[in-house]
Image (cartoon, rainbow, N blue to C red):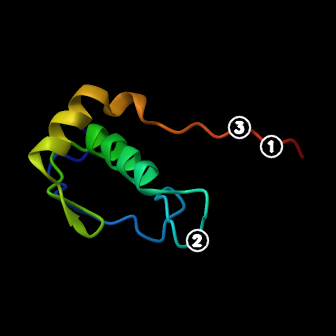
Amino acid sequence: EVTPALEYLSLLGNEACPNQLVSLDKDEDDYQRYRYFVLHKLKNLKFLDSRKVTQKEHLEAEARGAFMKVVKPKTEK
């Protein structure tokens, strides 16, 4: 693991973090999938964005986090 000591991370305002206020096509499910994926990659996080990470989220991220990555289609220029 590259960042074993990282316990607190906020990606609020970052394009990677689904935001219901900016994108009407995003919802709470999108945000939860994002959390599972980030927690899968950064297993020692205690806080992500403005919320404490729960034990249930850690377990779910371990089981399914790898499958939560959102792949966006490439746009032609």
Q: Earlier in the sequence, mark 3 or mark 2?
A: 2
Q: Secondary structure at mark 1?
A: loop
Residue at left offset 33%, top offset 46%: 38
Residue nearest the observer in this picture, 46 or 59: 59
| Amino acid type for the residue under numbered disc 1 | Thr
Distance from disc 3 to disc 2, alpha carbons, whole Å, reads 20 Å
Left/right placement of residue 6 relative to residue 22 reads left
Residue at left offset 31%, top offset 29%: 64
Task: Give the residue number, with chain letter if any, for mark 3.
Answer: 73
Q: Position of residue 68 (x, y in %)?
A: 42, 35
Left/right placement of residue 54 relative to residue 24 reads left
Q: Are marks 3 and 2 in contact (CB under 8 Å)?
A: no
Task: Give the residue number, with chain letter if any, for mark 2.
Answer: 22
Q: Position of residue 16 (x, y in %)?
A: 50, 56
Q: Position of residue 4 (x, y in %)?
A: 17, 45
Residue nearest the observer in this picture, 42 or 28: 28
Q: Position of residue 19 (x, y in %)?
A: 50, 65
Task: Give the residue number, with chain letter if any, for mark 1.
Answer: 75
How dense is the environment of label 2, judged by Cα within 10 Å: few (below 14), some, or many (20 and up)? few
